[in-house]
Image (cartoon, rainbow, N blue to C red):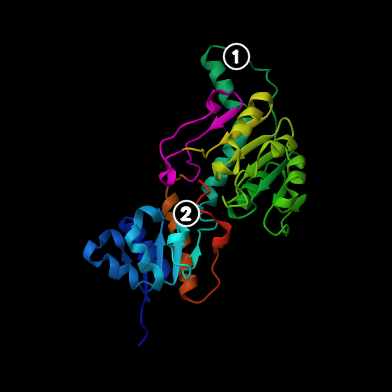
Amino acid sequence: MTVAKRVVVACPMEEALRERIRSVLGPDVSLSFLSDEPDSSRSGTIRNSDAILCFFFNREIRPEEYALLGSVRFLQTISTGVDFLPFSSIPESLPIACNAGGWSSQIAEHTLAMILSLSRKLLPLHEELRRGCFHKEEPVLRTLRGKTAGIIGYGGIGKRVANLLRAFGVKIAAVNSSGKTSDDVVFCGTLDDLHEGLRLSDIVVMSLPLMRRTKNVIGRAELAAMKSDAIFVNVARAHLVDEEALYEHCMTHPDFCAGIDVWWREPTWGGGDFSLRFPFLDLPNVLGSPHNSNSAEEGFADAAVVAAGNVARFLRGEICSGRVNRDDYSESVPG
């Protein structure tokens, strides 16, 4: 008799989503939800699981329960970024996978919205209209056709952004971990080639994970390598970018535009209240959003289903995506 594999979902889920997860995992998997477990049975449920599916790991698994993870075979996050995980407290024997591409559709659409808004100067023109100024001919607005977009982090999100931009006649310069791709691009390199990719690009999109090597990967030198009128959009992690350097560059380069969805101090992942060291939002060439590029109808549910599919592949002994190399991360890296 085959023993059913045990999967524990650590985050709260509504019944409709629970049914979708059950369907993805299949009838041979026993599914439990920590939110249903009394304190007296949580330890046993965690210890006896084959895989755990979580979202806000730090809030869903209690610190005193970390030691129980030693017998778990697989930890899958619903989030794409994993820089917030307490790696030193998670047993080294436990494989971890992020949700590669699970949120790509909505984040790509948000990125495109920022690029279009900045290129067409929608926010400042709206403000002028509100003040009674009707400037039809000025400023001269940009078109995307024929431009080049540098996608810094050409993974699930980056590729989805590229596909949307190609429909506008935009050429793609890609930066990824291998420096190779079979996609239609005018340039492909690694972070070692970053400056070359930046110099080529009219639009720069940050979709990198935050790791030891990528913290402050965009600083003064990288900003100086960009075109003076580049459109820069960060939908990944704030700490990929030197905060002071970006503010100064936006101040001194009025034709340069920045779309910022992720912030250096924000409540996501328990990072504290939103606050700014520099008044980015007072600048006419900056467009901000409250780290909600991943928000969409059924967005969380769809991402959870993608993550559950990865768990199912692991349990079947198949190749799964998003495997995390712990050596790439440091808990001292803010995120």
Identify residue type, mark 1. Phe
Residue designated by label 1: 134
- Residue 150 picture location, percent across and down: 70, 44
The mark found on residue 79 in the picture is 2
The answer to which of 330 and 71 lies nearer the viewer is 330
Identify residue type, mark 2. Ser
Q: Residues within 10 Å of mark 2 (few under 14, many from 20)?
A: many
Placement of the N terminus among the 4 image quadrants: bottom left
> What residue sits 44% from the left and 67% below the top?
91
The answer to which of 259 and 74 lies nearer the viewer is 74
Whether residue 303 is visible:
yes
Span shown in magenta:
266-294
Quarter residue 29 falls in:
bottom left
> What residue sits 28% from the left and 58% below the top?
35
> Which SS class for mark 2?
loop
Q: Nearer the viewer, mark 1 or mark 2?
A: 2
- Residue 147 picture location, percent across and down: 74, 39
